[in-house]
Amino acid sequence: QVQLVESGGGLVQAGGSLRLSCAASGSIFSINVMAWYRQTPGKQRELVARMPKGGSTIYADFVKGRFTGSRDNAKNTLYLQMNSLKPEDTAVYYCNTWPLTIAIPWGQGTQVTVSS
């Protein structure tokens, strides 16, 4: 079973940048689409970016132009470069497949806090 470990979060001022990583314990090469999600307290988890195995990343409107998602299948790792961060980007960020499958459980996520 593939397990996911997110890292790279932290506290940053508005306008700053962070780079998140998601390390998979197994191969993600065969997974067609991997994705980044985020969740804030009291809200449902929302999709941030989808990264197809052989195509361009697709972004949610609220991060388009600011975030860049990528995947390194050889390293079984996903990345999310976040620039021009806003306070409303504050959330716990997770990676997983898209669509979701019960075969891969959620990791612990990584907290991103953007101060104004």
Image (cartoon, rainbow, N blue to C red):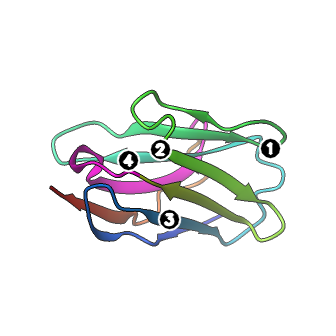
**Residue sitting at 60 percent across and 60 percent down?**
79
Above/below status of 74 relative to 48: below
Q: Which class describes the residues within 10 Å of circle 1: few (<14), some (14-19), or many (20+)?
A: some
Residue 114's label in the rendered image is none
The residue pinned by badge 4 equals 38
Badge 2 is on which residue? 66
- Measure the alpha-carbon separation of dots 1 and 2: 21 Å
Tell me what residue is drawn at x 38 percent, y 69 percent. Answer: 9
Alpha carbon separation for disc pair 4 and 3: 12 Å
Q: Is residue 1 visible?
A: no
- Answer with mark 1 or mark 4, whichever residue precedes in sequence: 4
Q: Position of residue 69 (x, y in %)?
A: 61, 49
Q: Secondary structure under badge 4?
A: strand
State the residue position of label 1: 53
Question: Pointer 1 and pointer 4: residues touching (CB < 8 Å)?
Answer: no
- Quadrant position of the N terminus in the picture: bottom right
Mark 3 or 1, closer to the camera? 3
- 102 vs 41, left or right, is right
**Gap in Å between the C-alphas at discs 1 and 4?**
21 Å
Circles 1 and 2 in contact, beta carbons < 8 Å? no
Which residue is tagged 3? Answer: 20
Amino acid residing under circle 3? Leu
Q: Nearer the viewer, mark 4 or mark 2?
A: 2
- Give the mark nearest the N terminus, 4 or 2: 4
* Mark 2 vs 3: CB contact within 8 A: no
Q: Which residues are magenta?
A: 84-100
